[in-house]
Amino acid sequence: MAKQAYDSKQRAGNAQKGQSSSNKSVGRNASNRQQAQAQNRQATSRAAQKAVRQQQKQQDLLDAKRSRRITFFSIFGTLIIGVALVVGLILHNQTTPQTVTPVNPAYPPVNGISCDANEQLDYHIHAHVSIYINGKLSQVPQNVGIASDGSCFYWLHTHDTTGVIHIESPTQKNYTLGNFFDEWS
């Protein structure tokens, strides 16, 4: 009986050992599986990170190309506009003054101001002048700068005695009181 009890204990102990050993192997297998899964996740994560890095590199290359293209066309466009402005200024400054054939030979150009058949309306302003001689107000005569037969108008002229000078020119230009006095004389 003692031997039976001993055998029974030993079998139970062996069973426990076998169970423990199989538990250990199951535990090892589970641990190995978890390690394998972790390694797979890491490998998958590394592959995903690598793919993201490659996509970012490709996007960076595309952005760099676009940036270079924009810079090139901006510089090219600026150069075109600059050249056009320079050419325009050169052509504008090189235009030869037109030789004006007087409408009425009795009224030749004065200081480059011609007497034209019609009033010019491209540049039209009015100026007022008051003339005092020995402290007394003198009237500016009417029709200064207008041909007596009405055939032509100088760009600076009067219509009445109010002192208003009509400046009606084909181009914007600074005219002086001296220009008006030269016409008046």
Image (tube, rainbow, N blue to C red):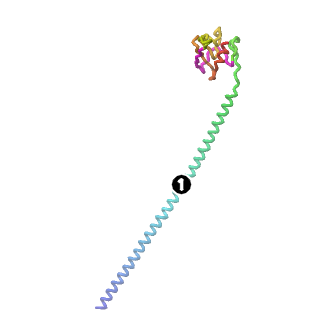
User: Residue 84 versus residue 152: which sits nearer the camera?
Assistant: 152
Percent position (x, y) of residue 63? 56, 49
**Which residue is most to the left?**
1
108 lies left or right of 10: right
Query: Quadrant location of the C terminus?
Result: top right
Magenta residue check for 117: yes
Give the image location of residue 41, x and y in percent.
46, 64
In this view, the residue in front, 8 or 127, is 127
Q: Picture quarter containing residue 170?
A: top right
Q: Secondary structure at mark 1?
A: helix
Question: Relative to residue 73, is residue 102 drawn left or right?
Answer: right
Q: Residues within 10 Å of mark 1 (few under 14, many from 20)?
A: few
Task: Tell me where residue 111 appears, x and y as whole percent.
Answer: 69, 18
Which residue lies under the disc numbered 1? Answer: 56
Instruction: Indicate the quadrant containing the N terminus: top left, top right, bottom left or bottom right.
Output: bottom left
**Region of the chain picked out in magenta, as a range:** 111-130
In terms of image quadrants, where is residue 160?
top right
As drawn, the residue found furthest toward the bottom would be: 2
Residue 91 against residue 11 in the figure, above or below:
above
- Relative to 66, does residue 140 appear above or below in the rendering? above
Query: Which SS type dominates the magenta stretch?
Result: loop
- Is residue 131 placed above or below 20 in the rendered structure? above
Residue visible at 34% across and 86% down? 10
Residue type marked 1: Gln
